[in-house]
Image (cartoon, rainbow, N blue to C red):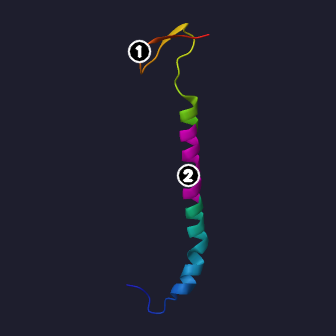
Amino acid sequence: MSAPDTNVEKQAKRHRPALFGLIGAVGLAAILFLVFLAWISLSGDAPEGADVQINGITGEAEVSN
């Protein structure tokens, strides 16, 4: 049950900072997630150090310089 004299506009104004905070936190989390995905993609897991490397798609040997 709610109080009979509730002012909805007044309550909406009082909750506005909290809602902006939640939206900001979700936005920041989304940005950090996208940065994390970009970092993972760019770091890759390419093999290093071998003179001859096998291409995973074609199966051919590639000589690294």
Q: Residue 13's spot in the image, x, y percent?
A: 59, 80
Q: Which of these two is toward me, 49 or 5?
A: 49
Q: Give me the residue at 53% from left, 21% from top.
A: 46
Q: Which of these two is toward me, 61 or 27?
A: 61
Does dot 1 land on a helix, a strand or a loop?
A: loop
Q: Give me the residue at 54% from left, 28% from top.
A: 44
Residue 48: name its quadrant: top right
Point out the image quarter for the C terminus.
top right
Count of numbered circles in the view = 2
Point out the image quarter for the N terminus.
bottom left
The local crowd at label 1, few if under 14, some if 14 to 19, many if 20 or more residues have their Cα within 10 Å, is few
Q: What stretch is highlighted in magenta?
A: 25-38
Q: Give me the residue at 49% from left, 89% from top.
A: 6
Q: Which mark is residue 45?
A: none
Q: Farthest residue toward the bottom?
A: 5
* Above or below 55: residue 9: below
Residue 24: name its quadrant: bottom right
* Above or below 23: residue 58: above
Residue type at the position of mark 1: Gly
The local crowd at label 2, few if under 14, some if 14 to 19, many if 20 or more residues have their Cα within 10 Å, is few
Q: Which of marks 1 and 2 is in front?
A: 1
Q: Residue 10's spot in the image, x, y percent?
A: 57, 85
Disc 1 from disc 2: Cα separation: 40 Å
Does dot 2 land on a helix, a strand or a loop?
A: helix
- Tell me, yes or no, whether the highlighted magenta stretch contains residue 28: yes
Q: Farthest residue toward the left?
A: 1
Q: Which mark is residue 59?
A: 1
Which of the two labelled residues, at mark 1 and mark 2, occupies the earlier sequence position?
2
* Above or below 23: residue 11: below
Residue behind mark 2? 29
